[in-house]
Image (cartoon, rainbow, N blue to C red):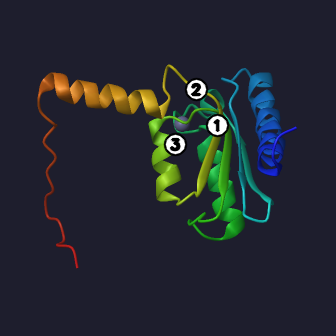
Amino acid sequence: MGTPNQTLDQKYMKMALAQAKKAFAADEVPIGAIVVDSEGQVMGRGYNQVEKKHLQTAHAEVIAISRACKKVGDWRLNDCTLYVTLEPCTICMGLVGLSRVKRVVFGAQSTLFGYQLMVAVWIDLTRRLRRLPTISTIMAIPPV
Ligand SMILES: [Zn+2]
């Protein structure tokens, strides 16, 4: 038994694991995700469907967040928590930030594509190159 929050986290992580089992049954990499609002309502569910959709962005988190946005009727998920069985990749963490998800709880760390490793690799690469890539804007509208 943990604190009430740990108990709730475990409850929602079990729901994310149930999504991951759906992915496994469909011969996908078994990753599942759940988006929960501040009232504890499940707003979105998703499981990995990269093979089925032939699409590298069909990650469990993307599907769960997309469904949550549709249900909420807003792209802002300010008070929501994302539960995902595996550490999100950089694409998904970008989406988490853009969608203003308040909290992320993940099960296992990903030593292959987890965002923490990818950020570390990116920083290491830029240090090795001793420069950052040049990023340009063209025909940009000045900030107001
Ligand atoms: Zn991802």
Marks 3 and 1 sit apart, C-alpha to C-alpha, by 12 Å
Label 1 element class? strand
Please identify, in this view, whether the residue under mark 3 or under mark 1 is nearer the observer. Answer: 1
Q: Amino acid at mark 1?
A: Phe
What residue appears at the point 77 percent right and 50 percent down from the top-left corner? Answer: 5
Pointer 3 residue = 92
Q: Which residue is mark 1?
A: 106
Residue 109: numbered disc = 2
Closer to the eye: label 2 or 3: 2
Q: Where on the picture, by quarter, is residue 132? A: top left
Quadrant for the N terminus, please: top right
Along the viewing direction, whichever of 26 and 43 lies nearer the viewer? 43
Q: Are marks 2 and 1 in contact (CB under 8 Å)?
A: yes
Ligand 1 within 8 Å of the CB at mark 3 = yes
Place of residue 19 in the rendered image (x, y in percent of width and height, measured from the top left): 78, 36
* Residue 129 shown left or right of residue 40 in the figure: left
132 left or right of 55 in image: left
Q: Nearer the viewer, residue 131 or 31?
A: 131
Q: Earlier in the sequence, mark 3 or mark 1?
A: 3
Q: Residue 140 in the image: state x and y as whole percent.
A: 17, 65
Looking at numbered disc 2 in the image, what kind of residue is underneath it?
Gln
